[in-house]
Amino acid sequence: MASANFTIPANLILLTIGLPWLGALLVWWIGNSHPKAQNILAVAFALLSGVTALALIPFAGKETALTISVGGPFGDFTFVADGLGIFLAAIATVIGSLAVIFSIDYMHGDHQLGRYYAMVLFFIGAMAGLVLTSNMLLAFVFWEITAFCSFDLISFNNDDPKAVAGGIKALIMTQLGGIGLLGGALLVYSYLGTYDISTFLAGANKLPANVLSLMAFGFLIAAAAKSAQFPFQTWLPDAMEAPTPISALIHAATMVNAGVYLLARFYPAFEQVPGWTISVIIVGVLTALLGALMAMVANDLKRVLAYSTVSQLGYMVYAVGVGSIFSSQFHLLSHSVFKALLFLAAGAVIHSVGTRDMMQMGGLGRRMPLVRLVFIIGALALAGIPILNGFWSKELVLESGMSDGPQWAYIIMVITAGLTAYYTARCVWLVFYGQPRSDLHGHGDAPAAMSVALIPLAIGAFLTELLAGPFIRMLNETLPFHSIHELSTLEIFQDVITAPATLVALAVIALGLLAWFTRGFLKGLSRPTQGLVKIAANSFGFDSINNSIVRLIQVCAEALRNTQTGMISWNVFGIVGGLLILLAILLIGA
Amino acid sequence: MDFSLFSGVFILVLGLLGIGFYGLLAARNLIKVIVALQLLIKGVIVIFIMAAHYNNQIDLGQSVAFTIIVADTIVAVIGLALAVQVRKHIGTLDLKKLTTLRR
Amino acid sequence: MYANDALIWLIIAPMLASPLAYFSGKLVQRKINTGKRNWTEYIPGVLTTLILISDLIPLSICAQTLLDKGVVSVTFGQITFHLDGIGFLLTTVVLALGSIVSLYSLRYMREEVGEEKYYALLTAMIGSIIGLGCTSDLFNLWVWFEAMAITTVMLVAFYRQQPAALESGVKYLVQSATGSVLVLIAISLVYTQVGSLSLDVIRDSVQSPSLLLITAGALFFIGFGVKIALVPLHTWLPDAHSQAPSGISAMLSGIVIEAGLVALLRALGSLFFTGNQWGYILLGFGALNMLVGNLMALRQIEVKRMLAYSSLAHVGYMLLGLGTAAAFGQFNGAAGGFFHLANHALMKGSAFLAAGALLYTLHLAKGDHAPLVVDDLAGAAKRYPVVAFALSVAVLGLGGLPPLAGFMSKWQIFVAGFETKNAVVIVLVIFAALNSVLSLAYYAPLVNRMYREKPSHLVETGKPASLLFTFPLILMTIITVIIGFYPTLLNWLTYPAASSLMALFGA
């Protein structure tokens, strides 16, 4: 099968993908009667893949590291360990390991633990594969595997019809978008005879302009569906039926970033396509704004975080649109850390009190001080408060938006930053402060394994911005087609601090926070916005659009079933009628 | 070829096929449908004989015709056997009542 | 020289197996008429399985020569058999699937009255499909086609005490007989014009379209189309597939409708003249089949009926690939179409066998002939982990999820579509991809249902699944996954078939 040259990076790549998959098989094989062994195996294999992914960092390079020749219309299965790929693979495996550790407590006593861990590990491997491969067919394969794992884990609790519906919705919507990626890969193959991404990036100008733009917009659709961007944002909130570690891993830190990754990866080829960058900006801006507005009015703790994820992904897409690949990936890094932290902390809360409704919480901070502490750290990072990682990356995004993007987009994004601060404050307050609003019997603070997962993330929220310099250097050295300006961490910090955009943004964020704490005074002012609140609470009507499409298809299907009458004369009529129609077509055509 | 022979055979074939298709579309009784199938296939045999005659390969036409007769007899036998079972287990040969499998 | 003998054995071995299975079954039955069951009742099934598996030996001998020379042919009296790539593909798939089905049927059919007839008919059907794959003559094509139709009708109505099975048998008989009449008319028209029945002679002498030949082509389409279940000729299919014994459902869906497709391609190949309208019509039927099949399956609650409707959709994918081959000369289209044929036999066979295993353990073993509905499957994974897993893999593969076999063959077909660089075909491919997504909307809930915590009442009281059910399922599941990881594994099968097809359609 393989004419692979097994160099060190090649082996590491294979291990990063293969170890979790092997672990998935083993966990599944052991069976649900040995939950302890399953826990140990799952954690061990997740950690091992994390180690191999991190070990790849010194081997980063722009050359193809591993080739498995398959041939025919499938091309060669190639992998390349460049900066972008290693970076995302490291996020997937490291946060994946933390999520698996967290799950030991969270999923304690579940009857289908084997399926759960197998799917999580399968996902981790596929996500690493998706970002490390340089073959578009293989990228599509991994893309679909992650979608499938996400589906299965969202509807993990199959007895709950809401979970099943959410899972299928996520599957169908990401698959619909996936057709954009499929079409793009096929177009490249039909014109260049290869699926190799670097070959395509080098030879993009050999494609006819209309084909290239078809491809660019196809990839935009794929990315929008995967990253829950406008107008596909509706699946992510419904995906919150998943167990919370899954929401942290798949629906905050990794899979939803795949869309942003795709746009960033192919940016050099599509940059010149007329109307593409502005479309990306529009998608990002609209999503960021709509997500933030919906997060302001949601009452389900996980849905607030989901809307906020949608909104933050909008920031990353916007950053790609204005051409700042680095700031989008940097924000991706910060976001994965603080959002995984927020989700896991929320998971600890939900695990403890047994509900997701923030209106029933309140005053939980006293009972779970550790969870409150880490949640607030995550929330401050999300709001963009200095010196947390979210501050640096968001400011960087806004700064490049101000200098390279249209002004209106920048203004909306800054306002959205203010809204973010508002809903973050609201969320923290409703959960941890004030008086308990109902009689919830919590188990108390996070148990051991949960804490083990939470604390590194909380520390990470303070520190990941230090990686900016090395990261940008790695990107610069290994991405030959992207033009990335190399800076050191210190220079980036100076940049951010001295930029006028930062002051503006901080002022707006402060306003947002102020708005929450002075909400009593603003009551009168909020009256006219009641209509907006209502629309936002109904997710701006996108859900009802989805539902009506589904209903339309179902009505059509139901109507079509009436053609199967079961009467022989009708069946024979089908034959005779078909013959007559075919003859008519042939004779007119001939 | 003799014109009157051709037109005579043509009318015969059209008649057989027409009655056969009409029977398939309109008959309500399973036995009648089987008869209609037989009529159709007889029409086809006539076309074959005619074509063999036209191509001066009447021996080929004959062997083909015999083969078809064998095959369509088997079909008829199975059809009638099914009809017997249908009558026995469903109690009717009315095709309008044989519509439990639908949608 | 061995190859010629091997070809004869290849064709007549199943034909010999048929009476052997029948009489051995009768003999055994006379001996064990005491009502006590013992191992002897397995004899006809074991014989059948062994003969079918050993028929792979002459097949592999033929394969050697085939790969060297491109064709194996042997004349038997006035009849010439002619094994080319397409016939080789059909034969391989039917023998492989047939062996698995007869192994599976050892348990599934054990308690049925007339078990020996089942095996006799099964082998006769396999034999006629092999014959159909090897024929070189238009009339013989019809004879084999008719033999296949007759045996399958009898197998569909095998449960002759069951009203529903009888009804489906009647419908299948009437529709397939109508179809075969149309085929015969088409053959007689071609014969009238050309004066020969040999496919090669017809192909050489037909240069330009004439009214007679175009009509004949349309009649071939509709006549064979009944068996292929082209929309709107498909109405027999859901009934027959859902009422037949599950092994036969697997054969019907996995290979019988595809045999019709091969027959159609052979017939059309002989009528291929400069215009390529046949290819466009294949594409048109492909689109129609995909849409109707998926929409009909979407709201279906009977599992086997749902799988039957999804066969319509999958024929649509094959037609899409083969259509790009016929209309645009895309080699990948032919290879992809045949790849999908083989994969569909594998995955749909596995799906029907798994559904059958559940039908058996939940209904039939309790003496109840009710259909298996989706709700019955709730929680099946806990009690029948292997069967549920096999069914999940099979339906997800059918839905086109990587890394399973179905995805790879669809991909090859899509590549062919894009390689035409024709806007209409590209739109058609996108349409096909949308249809794959639509199909997941009924496959995915099926999987969800099986992995519920709370089992349905039927599952709680279900009988255990025999090893004879799980072993074939494990085998097919593993192959499905392997092909998904290594898609060129079947190239030895699909590429010769594609070359033969390209030769037929003048490339």
Image (cartoon, coloured by chain):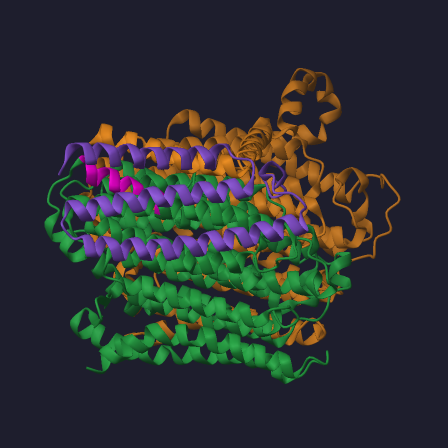
Q: Does residue A472 appear in the picture of this structure? A: no
Q: Nearer the viewer, residue A375 or A125?
A: A125
> Residue at (26%, 80%) from the top-left corner?
C5
How many numbered marks does the figure carry? 0
Q: Position of residue B3 (x, y in %)?
A: 15, 32
Quarter-wise, where is residue C358 in the image?
Answer: bottom right
- Left or right of C503? Residue A553 is right
Which lettered chain is shown in green?
C
Counting from the top left corner in percent of width and height, residue C470 is at: 59, 72
Picture colour for chain B: purple
| Residue drawn at the location 42% of the way across and 30% of the way down | A282
Please give the letter of the chain rendered in orange.
A
Tell which of A225 and C17 is nearer to you: C17
Location of the C terminus of chain A (image quadrant): top left
How far across and down, in percent of the image, does residue A549 sit? Answer: 54, 31
What segment is highlighted magenta in the picture?
A: C211-223
